[in-house]
Amino acid sequence: MPPALSYSILSLGSGYLLGSIPSALWICRFFFRVDITQVGSGNPGMTNVWRTLGWKPALPVALVDAAKGFFAAYLGLLLTHSVLWALLAGIAAVIGHSFSLFAHFKGGKGVLTGFGAFLFLSPIASLSSLSLWVVVLLLSRFVSLSSIAAAVTLPVFITLESHWHGMPVFNSVFWAALVVCGFVVVRHRANFSRLLNGTEPRFQGKSS
């Protein structure tokens, strides 16, 4: 196998394995003696951790989830010297997070891991989407609506950042963001239905 292809495959495998780290499951189990899949919504993600256990365990979960995407993209670029493979490694991390090898191929919805990947690849656009996420959450108290809004607008922010840098706006980062953000929106389809029906719970995180 050619070395370049070997490194490309390694970048995908590393991205998937990084993404597969079930941070919410392990942090809650090892440090708080709680199986996060058995409390609250049962979703092994930051939101459910914050709802049920408070911000202290939710903060490291959020940081690790974002770091998975960030370092997956970083390793992809380091191994292959290719932005395309860095993007594919970031996508692999999102897939790993949502279908974790270490959690019976279950997982979260990919929001923070996707954010981490694009934070490495397109930082201004990613931070802009994060800012929008915060604003929508403060105004609506719906985490799902915030996540959907951030996902829908991230490709737009990427085109603006690319234009600002004098790059083609419909570049590989844009198309990768379109794929990842579409995936995130699909993962929120049940939340979207509840939002339309008026049955989606508003976020009331525990303060402890």
Image (cartoon, rainbow, N blue to C red):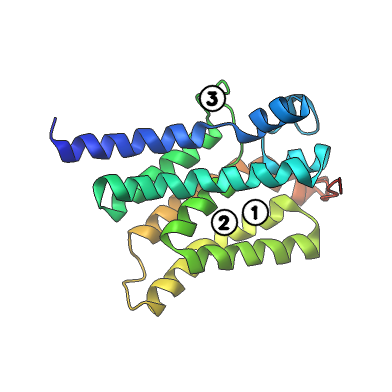
Residue at x-position 56% and y-position 65%: 127
Q: Is 70 in front, or is 92?
A: 70
Q: Quadrant of residue 141?
A: bottom right
Q: Residue at x 58, y 27 (%)?
A: 106
Give the amino acid type for the residue marked by disc 3 in the picture.
Phe
Q: Are marks 2 and 1 in contact (CB under 8 Å)?
A: yes
Give the camera-side residue of 131 and 109.
Answer: 131
Query: Measuring 60% from the left and 59% from the top, which residue is drawn there?
Result: 150
Identify the element where label 2 is drawn. Answer: helix
Q: Read off the residue under disc 3.
A: 105
Q: Is residue 79 visible to the viewer in this orientation of the structure?
A: yes
How would you rate the neighbour count of disc 2 (Cα within 10 Å): few for under 14, some for 14-19, many for 20 or more? many
- Quadrant in the picture for residue 103: top right
According to the picture, the residue beneath numbered tag 2 turns out to be 151
Q: Mark 1 falls on what kind of element?
A: helix
Q: Quadrant of the N terminus?
A: top left
Relative image position of residue 77 (x, y in whole percent): 31, 50
> For the residue marked with disc 2, what is the amino acid?
Ala
Q: Residue 44 at what x, y percent from top left?
A: 67, 33
Q: CA distance from mark 3 to mark 2?
A: 23 Å
The residue tagged 1 is 147
Q: Residue 142: where, in percent of width, then height?
A: 77, 54
Q: Is residue 28 left or right of residue 169?
A: right
Tell me which label, 3 or 2, sits earlier in the chain: 3
Could you classify mark 3 by the number of other residues whose Cα lies within 10 Å: few (under 14), some (14-19), or many (20 or more)? few
Q: Residue at x 65, y 66 (%)?
A: 132
As measured in the structure, the alpha-carbon distance from the residue carrying label 1 to the one carrying label 3 is 22 Å
Mark 1: few, some, or many residues within 10 Å (few <14, many ≥20)?
many
Do the CB atoms of the residues marked 3 and 2 lie less than 8 Å apart? no
